[in-house]
Amino acid sequence: MNLDLILQSDMPQIYHRIAEKVFNGERISEEEGIALFDKAASLNYLGSLANYIREKKHGDNTYFNKNFHIEPTNICVFDCKFCAYSKLIRQKTDYDAWEMSEEEIIEKVRSYDNSDITEVHIVGGVHPKMGLHYFANLIKKVKEIRPELHVKAFTAVELEYMCRKAKVSYREGLQILKDHGQNSLPGGGAEIFAEDIRAEICNDKCSSEQWLEIHQTAHEIGMPSNATMLYGHIEEPKHLVDHMNRLRNLQDKTGGFNTFIPLKFRNGNNQMSHIEEVSVLEDLRMYAIARIYMDNFPHLKAYWPMIGRQTAQLTLNYGVDDIDGTIDDSTKIYSMAGAEEQSPTLTTEELVALIKDVGRKPIERDSVYNVLKDYSEVNFDAVEA
Ligand code: V47
Ligand code: SF4
């Protein structure tokens, strides 16, 4: 990569320094991270640096997995202002509230009996009656049906509530879930860690400190996890950098995070609907900055049901190396908030084509990023014949 190609002569010195650090594999500082949000850092500049890092770490490899989602309920005791679920508990009748029974959940797992799916992602609203022991037993039953299925379940928000209600420590609660078959944690509930912003957008759920402690504890007992960040609402660049910094510090300690997932705020049907959504260009800038800043996170994921297939394709040139999976019946938290994809499913063939169309290499992974299959040369017509 030629520095002269991406640096314009009139760019302030700080951008020269950041580019040099990236090419030397050095970490950038918080101050440098904030500077990347300034318009003086062009999209071309950000994209080139992020793509350099992406290709250094993964070449053209673009990961996906074969998964499905279970959302046991959308009833939630909390009141996050950005969430399209959040009024449900008080005005249940006005909304499409649902509570899946244990039989329905098990039935859903069984419906994948003859498919080559490798992961189930279980996440939902925080229901006052669905507790730690209920979920632990449910996971045990899921594993009895399909022992090799990877169970990625419960955000730190759900876990904090479950442990509090069951009167157990985070370590005890997580150990119980692990002993019943849970393998890892998804990255939700992180939102924005900066306390002043958190107080404005989600003041009644787990604190930033609790979120980080739960993930640290999970890593310590051998459960890997992901981390998210909700961007594009009332936060400022300094809050985003502070958020990424707290995650980067924890990752230095534990090494337990697999992937970082910036989540674009969608403004449909929630208490923040008056806030305009950011543009696709802002999305690309966000992904690129995340790739540059989060040097110790192996992967950067774009959640395609949220941003749509075409933007997901674009992100592959802005640092992203993972576009999640053949998500069947993805979390309705997004479709209810106005996300691009209202019923997001992609067949393996479609996902592979989407990745190949932008010149990248489709790789099926398992939940902890072991390579399962390289789809670059797979001819689906031949497979079907
Ligand atoms: O924490 C809720 C977000 C998250 C809105 O780990 C919204 O692989 C935007 O974290 N606009 C839950 N975002 C889902 C989640 C997730 C999704 C996919 C993959 C993984 C993973 C994790 O959804 C919440 C919140 O940040 N969210 N409402 C909204 N209006
Ligand atoms: Fe509940 Fe999660 Fe929605 Fe917050 S984001 S109201 S915790 S479902």
Image (cartoon, rainbow, N blue to C red):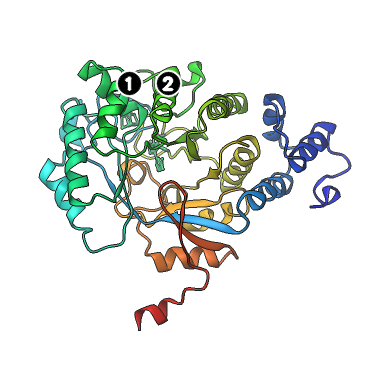
Going 55% across and 24% down the picture, which residue do you hit?
Answer: 246
Going 21% across and 33% down the picture, which residue do you hit?
Answer: 136
Q: Say if mark 2 contacts mark 1, CB within 8 Å.
A: yes
**Front residue (pair 306, 68):** 68
Going 89% across and 42% down the picture, which residue do you hit?
Answer: 9
SS assignment at label 1:
helix
Residue 326 percent location from the top left of the image: 37, 57
Amino acid at dot 1: Tyr
Based on the displayed image, in which of its 4 quarters is residue 217 positioned?
Answer: top left
Q: CA distance from mark 2 to mark 1?
A: 8 Å
| Mark 2 residue CB less than 8 A from any atom of ligand 1 | no
Q: Quadrant of ligand 2?
A: top left
Return the residue at label 2.
213
Amino acid at dot 2: Glu
Label 2: how many residues lie within 10 Å, few (<14), some (14-19) or many (20+)?
some
**Front residue (pair 230, 107):** 107
Based on the displayed image, in which of its 4 quarters is residue 223 positioned?
Answer: top left
Residue 131 visible in the snapshot? no
**Front residue (pair 325, 61):** 61
| Residue 363 as seen in the image, left or right of residue 77 | right
| Residue 348 as seen in the image, left or right of residue 28 | left
Residue found farthest to the right? 9
- Quadrant placement of the C terminus: bottom left
Residue 76 percent location from the top left of the image: 25, 29
Residue found farthest to the bottom? 385
Residue 200 percent location from the top left of the image: 44, 19
Vertical arrangement, residue 357 with respect to residue 269, above or below: below
Return the residue at label 1.
170
Q: Earlier in the sequence, mark 2 or mark 1?
A: 1
**Front residue (pair 11, 380):** 380
| Residue 315 as seen in the image, left or right of residue 75 | right
